[in-house]
Image (cartoon, rainbow, N blue to C red):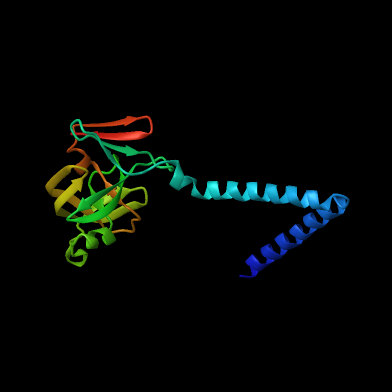
Amino acid sequence: MGDTLARFGYLTILLVAVVGWFMATNRPSIGRSLQMALVWGMIFMGGMVIYGMWHDISRSYAIQVSSDGGAITLPRARDGHYYVTAEINGVDINFLVDTGASDLTLSRADAQRVGIDVDALHFLGSANTANGTVPIAYTRLNQVRLGPHLDRDVSASVNGGKMKKSLLGMSYLGKYGRIEILGDRLVLNR
Protein backbone atom coordinates (compact mmCIF):
# COMPACT_ATOMS: atom_id res chain seq x y z
CA MET A 1 0.00 0.00 0.00
CA GLY A 2 2.82 2.41 0.91
CA ASP A 3 4.64 1.65 -2.33
CA THR A 4 1.47 2.37 -4.33
CA LEU A 5 0.98 5.71 -2.55
CA ALA A 6 4.63 6.66 -3.23
CA ARG A 7 4.22 5.90 -6.93
CA PHE A 8 0.96 7.85 -7.05
CA GLY A 9 2.64 10.81 -5.32
CA TYR A 10 5.56 10.71 -7.77
CA LEU A 11 3.21 10.61 -10.76
CA THR A 12 1.17 13.49 -9.32
CA ILE A 13 4.30 15.64 -8.88
CA LEU A 14 5.40 14.75 -12.42
CA LEU A 15 1.96 15.66 -13.79
CA VAL A 16 1.98 19.02 -11.95
CA ALA A 17 5.46 19.76 -13.32
CA VAL A 18 4.46 18.94 -16.92
CA VAL A 19 1.22 20.96 -16.68
CA GLY A 20 3.12 23.87 -15.10
CA TRP A 21 5.72 23.81 -17.87
CA PHE A 22 2.95 23.64 -20.48
CA MET A 23 1.12 26.62 -18.99
CA ALA A 24 4.29 28.71 -18.68
CA THR A 25 5.45 28.14 -22.26
CA ASN A 26 2.03 28.67 -23.84
CA ARG A 27 0.72 31.65 -21.81
CA PRO A 28 -0.10 33.87 -24.82
CA SER A 29 -2.27 31.21 -26.53
CA ILE A 30 -3.46 29.18 -23.57
CA GLY A 31 -6.99 28.52 -24.94
CA ARG A 32 -5.70 27.03 -28.17
CA SER A 33 -3.04 25.02 -26.30
CA LEU A 34 -5.59 23.54 -23.91
CA GLN A 35 -7.77 22.56 -26.87
CA MET A 36 -4.83 20.75 -28.52
CA ALA A 37 -3.93 19.07 -25.22
CA LEU A 38 -7.50 17.84 -24.89
CA VAL A 39 -7.46 16.43 -28.45
CA TRP A 40 -4.17 14.61 -27.84
CA GLY A 41 -5.46 13.36 -24.48
CA MET A 42 -8.53 11.87 -26.18
CA ILE A 43 -6.35 10.23 -28.86
CA PHE A 44 -4.15 8.75 -26.11
CA MET A 45 -7.18 7.46 -24.17
CA GLY A 46 -8.64 5.91 -27.35
CA GLY A 47 -5.35 4.12 -27.96
CA MET A 48 -5.39 2.76 -24.41
CA VAL A 49 -8.95 1.48 -24.85
CA ILE A 50 -8.06 -0.25 -28.14
CA TYR A 51 -4.96 -1.80 -26.56
CA GLY A 52 -6.95 -3.04 -23.55
CA MET A 53 -9.71 -4.55 -25.68
CA TRP A 54 -7.51 -5.87 -28.50
CA HIS A 55 -7.83 -9.47 -27.28
CA ASP A 56 -11.63 -9.22 -27.56
CA ILE A 57 -11.82 -7.38 -30.88
CA SER A 58 -8.95 -9.03 -32.76
CA ARG A 59 -10.71 -12.32 -33.51
CA SER A 60 -13.41 -14.71 -32.47
CA TYR A 61 -12.30 -17.85 -30.63
CA ALA A 62 -15.44 -19.82 -31.35
CA ILE A 63 -14.94 -23.12 -33.10
CA GLN A 64 -15.99 -23.28 -36.69
CA VAL A 65 -17.50 -26.43 -38.15
CA SER A 66 -17.42 -26.87 -41.92
CA SER A 67 -20.36 -28.39 -43.74
CA ASP A 68 -18.19 -30.86 -45.66
CA GLY A 69 -17.57 -33.73 -43.25
CA GLY A 70 -17.73 -31.69 -40.07
CA ALA A 71 -14.11 -30.50 -39.92
CA ILE A 72 -13.52 -28.45 -36.80
CA THR A 73 -11.40 -25.30 -37.11
CA LEU A 74 -9.87 -23.66 -34.05
CA PRO A 75 -8.24 -20.20 -34.27
CA ARG A 76 -4.86 -19.67 -32.63
CA ALA A 77 -5.08 -17.61 -29.46
CA ARG A 78 -2.95 -14.58 -28.83
CA ASP A 79 -0.56 -16.66 -26.69
CA GLY A 80 0.08 -19.05 -29.61
CA HIS A 81 -1.99 -21.93 -28.22
CA TYR A 82 -5.28 -23.42 -29.34
CA TYR A 83 -8.23 -23.54 -26.96
CA VAL A 84 -11.61 -25.19 -27.29
CA THR A 85 -14.71 -25.76 -25.21
CA ALA A 86 -15.90 -29.36 -25.25
CA GLU A 87 -18.96 -30.77 -23.54
CA ILE A 88 -18.05 -33.47 -21.05
CA ASN A 89 -21.00 -35.40 -19.57
CA GLY A 90 -23.22 -32.44 -20.46
CA VAL A 91 -20.93 -29.78 -18.90
CA ASP A 92 -18.89 -27.26 -20.92
CA ILE A 93 -15.18 -27.52 -20.10
CA ASN A 94 -12.48 -25.24 -21.50
CA PHE A 95 -9.45 -27.12 -22.81
CA LEU A 96 -5.98 -26.31 -24.02
CA VAL A 97 -5.38 -28.45 -27.12
CA ASP A 98 -2.12 -30.25 -26.33
CA THR A 99 -0.69 -32.73 -28.83
CA GLY A 100 2.15 -33.32 -26.36
CA ALA A 101 -0.23 -34.67 -23.72
CA SER A 102 -0.91 -38.40 -23.84
CA ASP A 103 -4.40 -38.21 -22.37
CA LEU A 104 -7.46 -36.07 -22.25
CA THR A 105 -6.54 -34.74 -18.80
CA LEU A 106 -8.96 -33.01 -16.46
CA SER A 107 -8.00 -30.73 -13.62
CA ARG A 108 -9.45 -31.73 -10.25
CA ALA A 109 -11.95 -28.84 -10.41
CA ASP A 110 -13.14 -29.77 -13.91
CA ALA A 111 -13.39 -33.46 -12.95
CA GLN A 112 -15.70 -32.51 -10.08
CA ARG A 113 -17.77 -30.28 -12.39
CA VAL A 114 -18.45 -33.22 -14.74
CA GLY A 115 -19.57 -35.47 -11.89
CA ILE A 116 -16.42 -37.41 -10.99
CA ASP A 117 -15.92 -38.04 -7.28
CA VAL A 118 -12.27 -36.97 -7.10
CA ASP A 119 -11.90 -38.10 -3.47
CA ALA A 120 -12.81 -41.66 -4.48
CA LEU A 121 -10.17 -41.83 -7.25
CA HIS A 122 -6.94 -43.77 -6.85
CA PHE A 123 -4.01 -41.68 -8.05
CA LEU A 124 -1.78 -44.65 -8.87
CA GLY A 125 -0.31 -43.39 -12.14
CA SER A 126 2.11 -40.57 -12.76
CA ALA A 127 2.74 -38.13 -15.56
CA ASN A 128 5.85 -36.16 -16.43
CA THR A 129 4.77 -32.57 -17.01
CA ALA A 130 6.46 -29.21 -17.42
CA ASN A 131 5.90 -28.78 -13.66
CA GLY A 132 7.51 -32.11 -12.79
CA THR A 133 6.02 -35.51 -12.07
CA VAL A 134 2.40 -35.45 -10.88
CA PRO A 135 0.05 -38.22 -9.74
CA ILE A 136 -2.82 -39.07 -12.04
CA ALA A 137 -5.93 -41.24 -11.79
CA TYR A 138 -7.42 -42.95 -14.80
CA THR A 139 -11.15 -42.75 -15.47
CA ARG A 140 -13.70 -42.98 -18.26
CA LEU A 141 -16.03 -40.23 -19.42
CA ASN A 142 -19.58 -41.12 -20.42
CA GLN A 143 -19.76 -38.52 -23.20
CA VAL A 144 -17.44 -36.09 -24.94
CA ARG A 145 -18.93 -33.73 -27.52
CA LEU A 146 -16.78 -31.47 -29.68
CA GLY A 147 -18.77 -29.63 -32.31
CA PRO A 148 -20.93 -32.20 -34.13
CA HIS A 149 -18.91 -35.19 -32.88
CA LEU A 150 -20.18 -37.20 -29.92
CA ASP A 151 -17.98 -39.92 -28.42
CA ARG A 152 -18.99 -42.27 -25.63
CA ASP A 153 -16.92 -44.07 -23.01
CA VAL A 154 -13.78 -41.99 -23.57
CA SER A 155 -10.64 -42.72 -21.56
CA ALA A 156 -9.25 -39.79 -19.57
CA SER A 157 -7.09 -38.98 -16.61
CA VAL A 158 -7.46 -36.61 -13.68
CA ASN A 159 -4.38 -34.65 -12.70
CA GLY A 160 -3.57 -34.93 -8.99
CA GLY A 161 -1.40 -31.81 -9.00
CA LYS A 162 -2.17 -28.15 -9.54
CA MET A 163 -3.44 -27.48 -13.03
CA LYS A 164 -4.96 -24.27 -14.42
CA LYS A 165 -6.63 -25.71 -17.51
CA SER A 166 -7.66 -29.16 -18.62
CA LEU A 167 -5.78 -30.62 -21.58
CA LEU A 168 -7.28 -32.10 -24.73
CA GLY A 169 -4.55 -34.65 -25.39
CA MET A 170 -3.88 -37.48 -27.82
CA SER A 171 -6.18 -40.10 -26.28
CA TYR A 172 -9.01 -37.93 -27.63
CA LEU A 173 -7.31 -36.20 -30.57
CA GLY A 174 -6.39 -39.65 -31.94
CA LYS A 175 -10.08 -40.07 -32.83
CA TYR A 176 -9.54 -37.58 -35.66
CA GLY A 177 -8.11 -38.89 -38.92
CA ARG A 178 -6.13 -35.76 -39.69
CA ILE A 179 -4.89 -32.84 -37.57
CA GLU A 180 -3.50 -29.88 -39.52
CA ILE A 181 -2.13 -26.46 -38.72
CA LEU A 182 -3.04 -24.10 -41.54
CA GLY A 183 -1.64 -20.65 -40.86
CA ASP A 184 -3.19 -19.55 -37.58
CA ARG A 185 -5.85 -22.29 -37.50
CA LEU A 186 -5.87 -25.85 -36.20
CA VAL A 187 -8.12 -28.12 -38.25
CA LEU A 188 -9.44 -31.45 -36.92
CA ASN A 189 -10.87 -33.81 -39.55
CA ARG A 190 -12.71 -37.09 -38.99
Which quadrant does the C terminus fall into?
Answer: top left
Judged left or right of residue 101, residue 141 is left
Q: Can you name the residue that lies furthest to the front here?
A: 31
Instruction: From the viewer's side, name the closer residue of 30 and 121.
Output: 30
Indicate the position of residue 9 as horizontal and vertical percent values: 71, 65
Q: Residue at x 27, y 44 (%)?
A: 101
Q: Residue at x 18, y 56 (%)?
A: 90
Q: Residue at x 32, y 31 (%)?
A: 181
Indicate the position of residue 60 as horizontal and vertical percent values: 38, 43
Residue 64 in which image quadrant: top left
Instruction: From the viewer's side, name the closer residue of 168 and 132.
Output: 168
Instruction: From the viewer's side, name the closer residue of 24 and 27.
Output: 27
Which quadrant does the N terminus fall into?
Answer: bottom right
- What is the number of callouts on the image? 0
Q: Can you name the residue that lies furthest to the right here?
A: 28
Judged left or right of residue 155, residue 109 is right
Judged left or right of residue 14, residue 59 is left
108, above or below 22, in the image: below
Indicate the position of residue 139 as horizontal and vertical percent values: 16, 55
Q: Residue at x 14, y 48 (%)?
A: 154
Q: Can you name the residue that lies furthest to the bottom here?
A: 2
Judged left or right of residue 97, residue 89 is left
